[in-house]
Amino acid sequence: MKPERWRELDRLFNAALQCEPAARPAFLDEACAGDKGLRKEIEALLVAHQEAGSFIESPALEVEAQLLADAHNESAVGQTIGHYKIISSLGMGGMGDVYLAHDNVLGRKVALKLLQAYFTKDTDRVRRFEQEARAASALNHPNIVTIHEIGHDSSFHFIAQEFVDGVTLRTYLSSKGLTLNEALEIAMQVASALAAAHAKGIVHRDIKPENIMVDKGSHLGRQHHVKVLDFGIAKLANLSATGMKAEATTRMLIKTGEGIAIGTAPYMSPEQARGESVDARTDIWSLGVVLYEMLTGKQPFVGATSQDVIASILRDDLSPVPTEFPDNVRWMLKKALRKETGDRYQTARELFSDLRDLHAQLQEIGAGVTHAVPATADIEHGGQTEAADAQEPAVTTRQPQARPTSSAEYIVGEIKRHRKAAIAGFTALVIVIAVIAFGLYKFIGQKQNQTSQNQPKPALPFQTMKISRLISTGKAVDAAISPDGKYLVHVVDDGGQQSLWMRQISTSSNVQINPPLDVSYLGLTFSPGGDYLYYVAWDKKNPFKLYQMPALGGTARTLITDIDSVVTFSPDGKQFAFLRGYPTQGEMAMVVANADGTSERKLAVRSLVLGPFGNPAWSPDGKVIAYPVENTANGDFMTLVEVRVADGSEKPISSQRWWRIGPMAWLRDGSGLIFTASESVASPSQIWRLSYPSGEAHRITYDLNDYVGLSLTADSSALVTVQSEQVSNIWIAPNDNARHATQITFSKFDGVEGISWTPDGKVVYASGASGTLDLWMIEANGTGQKKLTADAGNNSRPSVSPDGRYIVFISDRTGTNHVWRIEADGNDATQLTNGDGELNPQCSPIGQWVFYQLATGKVGLGKVAIGGRETVQIVDKASSGVAISPDGKWIASAYFLPSDVKIAIYPIEGGEPYRILDLLGYDYFRWTPDGRALAYVDERNVSTINSQPIGGGPPKQLTDFKPDRIFSFAWSPDGKQLALARGTVNKDVVLISNFKDQK
Amino acid sequence: MTTAPPNEVTQLLIDWSGGNQAALDRLIPMVDRELHRLAHHYMRRENAGHTLQTTALVNEVYLKLIDQKNVHWKNRAHFFALSAQLMRRILVDHARNRQYAKRGGGAQRVTFDEALVISSERGADLVALDDALSKLASIDQRKGKVVELRFFGGLTVEETAEALQISAVTVMREWSMAKAWLYNSLNNET
């Protein structure tokens, strides 16, 4: 179809829709002017418009989820599981689907509950489930559904239980009204079932009409026979659905509604709703709700959503029980539905007794035939008075403790809290050093002297770069120095709260200019004259804002709203430039404005990829502004370009690529730029110098620290940045007494990237002491330290072969991370893998295999013979970390889900996981020497190594090295000693001088 | 230096849009897992009277997938556009698999995870819709985008408007015509 015709079709279709249907033919007669083809097409579309209805109105994702759900439901019919042949689907439950099945051995019908794969993948939970279900199966009571068998075949875990030929109370309730007598009969039987279960310590936790079966005979006017379903299962359903402890689970259920089987909320007790631990009295509440509903036809606490219902349970007084009910009934309901557990019926037996007495009374006076709704006949017989109602103490109410939020909000919040906790734990470890009174001004003045002391010939091209610490609290996250070098402004991050501080260098006075707030500072800039501080801050909701504040204190005012970089000033200080993204236009722009924020104009515009990332820097001659731009043509990377201020034209400055480029500053003479940048997503952010205009770039720092923030003194003799430095050393601890650890290395970056033992008791570790990562070996007593690799890229994550002959490790000497092997003396380096990028090699304790993680390109786990190069992929699930059990039979690796991390234990041959574990830390984990647990660094408390039994149970703390952080650890082959890398991460403000001639 | 961060979806999306197929291979399991979780919500639905807040669930899938950490990241619209493309790709693939399973026939025993490939009439619909949508996009790119963002991306009218930088009224106009055209094309053409 020609575009013109399509446009016409489009226009007329929409115009026709605007007309009343009756007026359309006339409209089309005129509009199509004899073009029958056009008219026919429009008419076809109008018909389609009428007929389409809900076509594609629901997002495909929802439709897909529905399909998956339906598929689940139908998938099992016709199969034989164990000795049960599945006949038809009975319904879906919280834990899995329920089917009618035929027991081939005993020739009876059973209700077969299949556990969803979702639950059964976690063997630990399945085990707990089975424990619970077995306990429940021991309940032998006429009102409790009998559990025949708990078992599994190769695909399913299942529960075979008594098939009750009847309907759920829910269905029964919806089909007919109940008489008071019927309601009491049902409640009595449930209470009786609860009393029996409670006596054995089993709490149901999910009493609701869906879990109460009424048998078919009940329809025929006989006494109802009621059976309660799913004892002990509710707890597990909650556990499994969320992977949290029961208490936490309930709390989460409240906040999210997630995992609440729809229909459960109205029956939840206040203590369940609050996420507190529950006991038998919770079932009494729920039965009270069921009784209320049976009598009145409605639930006592209602709301539009689960959250509203829960809020009502916690907050609202019990809706008055209609006065037409007998006094005793109203009194019983109130007593069952008291918000405080202590005020409620204390036992199901008590409730049962009251129900039975009332039932007997009603039988005597012949009220049993009366319909509960409306209950008219028993008004006279019940003898109730309004006064009795008034005597009841008011039901205490309680405000909900947590405002219900959407599940998304909750989850995000939870992730953030989690992260925050990790950060808090981490900052707590940082050794707080008193701020050193450091005379920077003096320092700069004396620089020449110091240089000449250190360097006999300052003119030499290779001067020694000097790094001095200005702020050593370990908590600095950004800093900038004033042009005159007198002031240092810096951001302190304490547990996620950021504050802004101004330090006068000469007096070392340090003034807080902005208090700790939940904000994030993006950049700090002094005006060229040093009178004002400009900073960009984010309140984590709205766009970033630029503030201006007098440098010597005063009120900050907002200059620019919506800014995405720091500002950079023109040499005369009259204008500044910044970057701003316009996501809806898919653009970003270099914007220039007056120093007071007025007269914005776009100097240059480019298409926006993700950022804008990076920051502009105005050249000292005022002619160009340099800034980094994102490219995605061939992977995601950044390059540097310059914009001419005169006409906005752009040209590249250098062909060098970086993954991300941080703040930049020009050298005063315009001969180059200094900036922070990282070469890849995994490499540290280092300080670089780029010569201008040649475009030649080289690193100034060659270390393993991250540098954040960058500013130069006006004479560009020194730069200020925040250095994030890891300090780590190797310690040896006797296994039975980790507190008697002794330090055996005294460097800076030892063991951060892995540690391993030789069979004869030496420790092999990676160290960054030389600026690159290299492998070292040392005796456990700290003697005989020896470097094994040199001048060959970064070498890390060593693992010694069981015979001690080889050390396998990761090296990037070819430009990509691969598994390499050296002899124990460091000779004969041999490359073992050659994929897209591998990590974390581990020698099996038996045999000749090396297992490793596929880290780039392909994902999963692989293995290679230590003597060969033929690789085999054994797991294709995205994995991280490798730990082999001491018997060589199992391999543990973390796998990442979008919001969760689990540890999978695979057979050494690979394939599907044998077990799935939750660890409270997955950065580094190893098997304990007995092979029964995985030891890991607790991510909430990075000072401790915990162990998680493979077979389940709570984790146990093995060591505590407060306030240090543990980076890696390994047990000696005899299991008697533990080698570990421990240390700190400090974020300090540093001053770097003599950097210009670094090559 | 360090192990891969758990949440790499943003980067993977960018890589994929830049032509890196390996990124797609890594994205699919992440999205699949979310799909299963979503399906799980449906399975918990016990009463017809209670409906789930499915829009919230779909949004949650996105929230879980995107890189919350990256505070500098502003181009939300771009992300959603990429996500919609990804969802389209994955969902249509699922539908193709269903068709394939159907042709393969046989009441094979399937585990819950394999239930993905259970045959369904709906499978055919989605594949046909995908084809029709491609055809629509070749005639009228913006209408194609509107459908992709709303139907596959699960975006609201307002979000679609933001992503395409057009008014909500225009989105609805485009949607009406696109929907009628697609419906007509699927029902009246062979």
Image: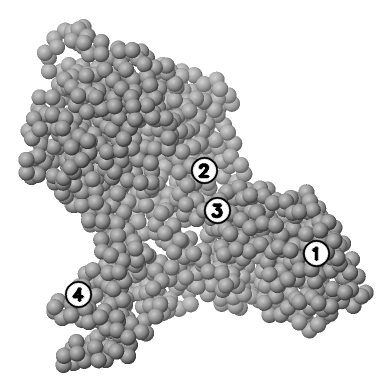
| Residue at numbered disc 1 | A330
Quick one: label 2, few (<14), some, or many (20+) residues within 10 Å?
many
Q: Please say whether residue A74 is visible from this viewpoint.
A: yes
Quick one: label 4, few (<14), some, or many (20+) residues within 10 Å?
some
Q: Nearer the viewer, mark 2 or mark 3?
A: 3
Q: Provide residue A821's location: percent of width, then percent of height.
A: 32, 36
Which comes before the other along the chain, label 1 or label 3?
1
Which residue sits at x=11%, y=41%? Answer: A643
Which comes before the other along the chain, label 2 or label 3?
3
Quick one: label 1, few (<14), some, or many (20+) residues within 10 Å?
many
User: Which sits in the foreground, A708 or B107?
Assistant: A708
Q: Are marks 4 and 3 on the same chain?
A: no
Tell me the SS state at disc 2.
Answer: loop
| Residue at numbered disc 2 | A919
Does residue A284 appear to the left or right of A463 in the view shown? right
Which residue sits at x=24%, y=88%? Answer: A27
| Residue at numbered disc 3 | A404
